[in-house]
Image (spheres, helix red, strand yellow):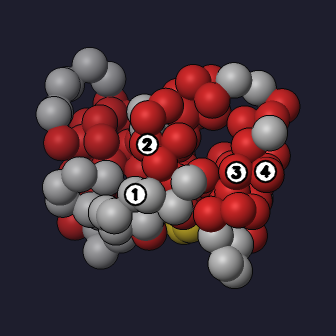
Amino acid sequence: MPIDIARASWSPMPDWIEVLADKCAEMSQRQVAERIGYSGGMVSQLLRNRYRGNLSAIEDAVRGAWMGATVICPVMGSIPTDTCQDWQRKSRDFVPSNRLRARMQTACSKCPRCRKEGA
């Protein structure tokens, strides 16, 4: 069980890792990874406490997807933190497909929450 793996690997286990493990038990690890915008391999590394990169973006994604964490976006108002990250990713490769995407690209490029690389 994913929760058993996480408990054996983390001491103490962060609340968002517990939520991630619970979601992996409810659905496939691949589905969990897709929902938060990361790979299944990264989710596996997280559960085993083997991921050595910056955890803050992943934590934001989990908190936004399943724990109700929100931020105030100047364009969209209150949005989940994982939605914010999704827009940040989209804004890196500007495609003028619609008015909202153009507004979000401008807003994200000026936002202090925007992770310029690797989010």
Circles 1, 2 touching at the beta carbon (< 8 Å)? yes
Q: Earlier in the sequence, mark 2 or mark 3?
A: 3
Q: Mark 3 points at which residue?
A: 5
Q: Which amino acid does label 4 sit on?
A: Ile
Q: Which residue lies furthest to the front in this view?
A: 8
Mark 4, secondary structure of its residue: helix
For the point 18% across and 25% down, the residue is 95
10 Å crowding of disc 1: few (<14), some (14-19), many (20+): some
Q: Position of residue 36 (x, y in %)?
A: 54, 40
In the picture of the structure, the residue carrying the numbered disc 4 is 3
Do residues under tags 3 and 4 come within 8 Å of each other at their CB atoms? yes
- Separation of residues labelled 2 and 3 (CA atoms): 14 Å
Question: Which amino acid type is shown beneath numbered disc 3?
Answer: Ile
Q: Name the residue type under label 2.
A: Met
In-image side of 11 versus 43 (left or right): right
Closer to the observer: label 1 or label 3?
A: 3
**For residue 38, above or below residue 57:** above
Please tell me whether mark 2 sits on a helix, a strand or a loop. helix
Q: Which residue extends farthest bottom?
A: 12
- Gap between marks 1 and 2, in whole Å? 7 Å
- For the point 76% across and 26% down, the residue is 27
Is there a contact, CB below 8 Å, between mark 1 and mark 3?
A: no
Quick check: 23 above or below 78? above
Q: In which quarter of the image is the N terminus?
A: top right
Circle on res. 51: 1
Q: Residues within 10 Å of mark 2 (few under 14, many from 20)?
A: some
User: Disc 1, disc 4: CB below 8 Å?
Assistant: no
Q: From the image, tell me which residue sits under label 2.
A: 42
Mark closest to the chain's N terminus, 4 or 2: 4
